[in-house]
Amino acid sequence: MCVYGGALTLITAMDSVVSTSPTRSLRIRMNAIIGISATIVGVLLPTDFINTTFYTILAVLAYLMAPWTAVNLVDYFVVRKGRYSIAEIFNPVGIYGRWNWRGITAYSLAFVAMIPFMYLSFYQGPVAEYFGGVDVAFFVGIPVGALLYWLFCLNQDLSREFSIIQTADLGLDAVAKPIA
């Protein structure tokens, strides 16, 4: 399950850079690459990996996810209020575009704001040290990311986007229903 999930994640990441179709052949190749790589890494890992390095990897992943989660939640519940065109999400030249500068900027600034609050084996932020090793980076990254994204979106005109969503007739359920 983890290998397949990793393969799909890798294919999705590739598709963000170069248009990629997740064919059966590509999924098999990516599963093989992930499976072989993970096996090699697993064999070469030191015995204390779980207690030290694995914790650090999970903490860094959580640091990366905190502002991303905040941006997504604010976009869904506050900015667009659940109104999306599913078909347009997959259209790089559609109403959402390829990249959302507001989201990327809010994410990046929130991550940078978290750095002084992080506590890792290889880096202890000054605020985390002051608090005696207590890691409060998540409590900074989530509200900072949410607030910045909301502020960046205040001047965004969504009326054209919403009218396109309402008039889209794509032969499938292309519109996510708004939250009540």
Image: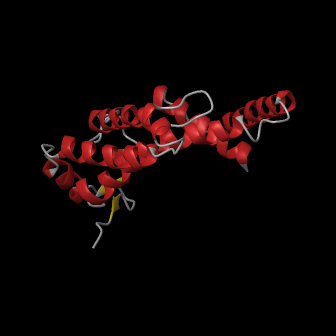
Residue drawn at (50%, 40%), measured in percent from left and top?
Answer: 63
In this view, the residue in front, 55 or 127, is: 127
Q: Position of residue 42 (x, y in %)?
A: 82, 34
Residue 32 or 81: which is nearer the viewer? 81
Q: Position of residue 172 (x, y in %)?
A: 39, 60
Res. 73 in view: yes
In the picture, residue 47 is in which quadrant?
A: top right
- Quadrant for residue 52, please give it: top right
**Residue nearest the viewer, comparing 157 with 88:** 157
Classify residue 56 as left or right of residue 160.
Answer: right
**Position of the C terminus by quadrant:** bottom left
Position of 97 relative to 150 (above/below) = above
In x, y percent, where is residue 160? 15, 48
Q: Which is more toward the observer, 178 or 75?
A: 75
Does residue 162 appear to the left or right of 41 in the view shown?
A: left
Left or right: where does residue 152 sit relative to residue 68?
Answer: left
